[in-house]
Image (tube, grey):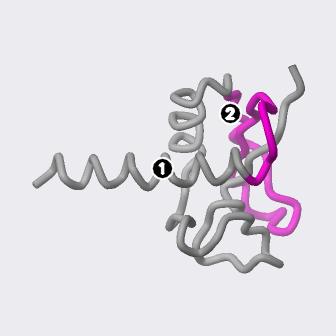
Amino acid sequence: MKKMVIWPAYLTVGKTRGGGRIVSRRNAVKSPKVEEIEKVARILNLEPEVEKEKAYPKTHWDKSGRVLVNKTGRKGEIVNAIAKGIKEMREKSKSARR
């Protein structure tokens, strides 16, 4: 199956569209980690592979890492599903701490 790259920049609320964000501001998350992307991608059965030493081309000095996932549909839909999954995961951990 074809693989697709998911960079944390695609999901970052502080980035502009020109800076690499793909999802809407409403769905974007603050400081997404490759571990969170991997966890949600695993839940979505996308068979994620983490590459921690990779750097997003627009910020080549920052080795934020990337996640390779199976391409099961449109990139925008998959990235949105991952962003929503991270938000839900964070909400659950917040409510569990209370």
In the image, the segment drawn in magenta is: 48-76
Residue pointed to by mark 2: 50
Residue at the image position 86 percent from the left and 68 percent from the top: 58
**CA distance for labels 2 and 1:** 16 Å
Q: Amino acid at mark 2?
A: Val
Number of numbered labels in the structure image:
2
Horizontally, is 94 left or right of 44 in the view?
left
The spot of residue 20 in percent (x, y) is: 78, 68
Q: Is residue 75 magenta?
A: yes
Where's the C terminus, which quadrant? bottom left
Residue reaching furthest to the left: 98
Assign the N terminus to one quadrant of the image.
top right
Which residue: 74% across, 43% down? 53
Q: Which mark is residue 86?
A: 1
Q: Tag 1: residue type?
A: Ile
| Residue 4 located left or right of residue 90 | right
Q: Residue at x 51, y 29 (%)?
A: 43
Q: Is residue 51 magenta?
A: yes
Q: Between label 2 and label 1, give the one nearer the viewer.
A: 1
**Quadrant of residue 49 within the rendered picture:** top right
**As drawn, is 87 to the left or to the right of 25?**
left
Task: Tell me residue 91's x, y (percent).
Answer: 31, 54
Q: Horizontal placement of 80 versus 7: left or right?
A: left
